[in-house]
Image: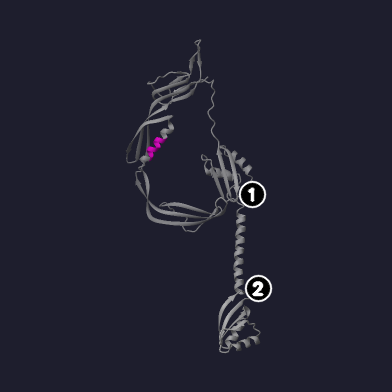
């Protein structure tokens, strides 16, 4: 109980120096000042303890008696109350923050799109917003099944969609439709024609009659395997021609890269800071309408929250502006153009590239890269006959 009383009222321990310390003790008793644990340190020094509310009265009496005092320890009382007030303010701030976090977590502030590479993210987000799901939406009131049905109607390219809500984050998983394979009937007559001009090296006719022989040159569109067959009785029958015709083909592809303007970085660099609150942005810089054509802008955005758990509608945007100047120069990207030409040719042919070579030419306006290649490919293509 004594310790609790000292913490509540405050306890002060001090040394009092005087030629007659007993006179100060008598004066305190007459004034009603309670001295706690008094003891003599030496002949002229008295160590006593008093409650905090009686400290001023004791100091007044000590001055009248011509005494000097030194405070050794001060605990409890006003200091403990001040500490409690600071802690209480901290607890209140923490409670308010948790309350705001709980309220903010009931709304969507981040939307992730997974899959759907052929559909632009902007189109997906616009369709999702038309369905009532967007930044700031109250997610407990969102019906994921209803949103899925509406999205499938708005985006016919989708075969399947899933909307997963987790706190203030929504993850949209998309699966695109696959193109239907070409359906044909075996009883429908068709012939095989040449898709490209070349010299035939090998003919393999699985159904139909081969018209060309190895070593023969053919042109694009010429019939290679005919659907016409003669039966034992001499009657002509039309079938669906099948087979492969491998031939040497030659290609010449040219890529053009125009002369353009390049950028040379300079020593200038500066940054701009902004704060985002939901859909609003607060800029902490002047001259937002000024053109920054002479700068390259790199934007770094930091959202407040824990990734994968929750996201708050508060974020920082740091724009790094790097000074640069434009210079007119020929963009010499010949090696990249050569690789693109090879990749384009590989996708175009049904076979392999046997040999190739490149040539370059540059004028004042453009850089020309030409690919000349010899390929071995299957040039047979199906062409159905009209009934």
From where the camera sits, is residue 368 visible?
yes
Distance CA(mark 2)–CA(mark 1): 50 Å
Residue shown at 64% from the left, 48% from the top: 141
Q: Which residue is mark 1?
A: 140
Determine which quarter of the picture holds residue 152. Answer: top right
Mark 2: few/some/many CA within 10 Å (<14, 14-19, 20+) = few
Q: In this orientation, does residue 289 appear?
A: no
| Rendered location of residue 374, percent (x, y) | 37, 29
Residue positioned 61% across, 69% down in the render: 85
Residue 338 inside the magenta-drawn segment: yes
Please give the name of the residue rendered at 48% of the width and 57% of the height, measured from the top-left corner. 273
Considering depth in this image, is 30 or 300 the residue closer to the camera? 30
Horizontal and vertical percent position of residue 19 = 56, 89
On screen, 10 above or below 307?
A: below
With respect to residue 228, does 4 lie above or below?
below
Give the residue furthest to the top: 233
Q: In which quadrant will I find the N terminus?
A: bottom right
Query: Closer to the camera: disc 2 or disc 1?
Result: 2
The residue that mark 2 highlights is: 4
Cβ–Cβ under 8 Å for marks 2 and 1:
no
- Vertical placement of residue 253 versus 316, above or below: above
Q: Position of residue 386 (x, y in %)?
A: 51, 20
Q: Position of residue 95 (x, y in %)?
A: 62, 61
Q: How busy is the neighbourhood of tag 1: few (under 14 within 10 Å), some, or many (20 plus)?
A: few
Using the image as rendered, state which of residue 94 and residue 295 is in the foreground.
94
Q: Secondary structure at mark 2?
A: helix
152 or 130: nearer the viewer: 152
Which stretch appears magenta?
A: 336-343
């Amino acid at each position: 109980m004594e310790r609790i009383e000292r913490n509540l009222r405050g306890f002060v321990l001090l040394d009092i120096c005087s030629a007659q310390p007993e006179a100060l003790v008598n004066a305190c008793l007459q004034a009603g000042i309670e001295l706690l644990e008094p003891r003599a340190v030496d002949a002229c020094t008295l160590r006593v303890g008093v409650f905090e509310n009686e400290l001023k009265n004791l100091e007044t009496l000590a001055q009248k008696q011509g005494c000097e005092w030194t405070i050794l320890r001060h605990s409890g009382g006003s200091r403990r109350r001040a500490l409690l007030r600071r802690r209480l303010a901290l607890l209140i701030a923490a409670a308010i923050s948790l309350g705001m976090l709980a309220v903010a977590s009931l709304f969507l502030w981040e939307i992730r799109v997974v899959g759907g590479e052929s559909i632009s993210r902007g189109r997906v987000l616009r369709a999702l917003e038309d369905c009532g799901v967007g930044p700031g939406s109250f997610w407990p009131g969102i019906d994921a099944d209803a949103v899925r049905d509406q999205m499938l109607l708005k985006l016919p390219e989708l075969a399947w969609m899933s909307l997963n809500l987790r706190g203030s984050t929504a993850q949209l998983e998309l699966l695109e439709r696959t193109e239907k394979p070409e359906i044909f009937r075996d009883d429908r007559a068709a012939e095989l024609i040449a898709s490209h001009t070349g010299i035939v090296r090998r003919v393999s006719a699985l159904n139909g009659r081969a018209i060309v022989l190895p070593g023969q040159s053919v042109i694009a569109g010429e019939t290679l395997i005919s659907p016409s067959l003669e039966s034992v009785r001499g009657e002509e029958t039309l079938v669906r021609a099948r087979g492969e015709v491998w031939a040497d083909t030659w290609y010449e592809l040219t890529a053009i890269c125009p002369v353009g303007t390049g950028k040379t970085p300079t020593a200038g660099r500066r940054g701009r800071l902004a704060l985002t609150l939901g859909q609003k942005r607060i800029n902490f810089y002047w001259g937002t309408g000024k053109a920054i054509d002479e700068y390259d802008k790199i934007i770094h955005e930091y959202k407040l929250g824990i990734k994968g758990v929750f996201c708050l509608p508060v974020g920082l945007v740091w724009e790094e502006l790097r000074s640069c100047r434009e210079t007119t120069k020929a963009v010499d990207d010949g090696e990249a153009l050569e690789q693109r030409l090879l990749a384009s040719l590989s996708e175009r042919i049904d076979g392999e590239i046997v040999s190739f070579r490149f040539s370059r030419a540059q004028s004042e306006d453009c850089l020309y890269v030409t690919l000349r290649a010899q390929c071995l490919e299957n040039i047979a293509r199906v062409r159905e006959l009209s009934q």
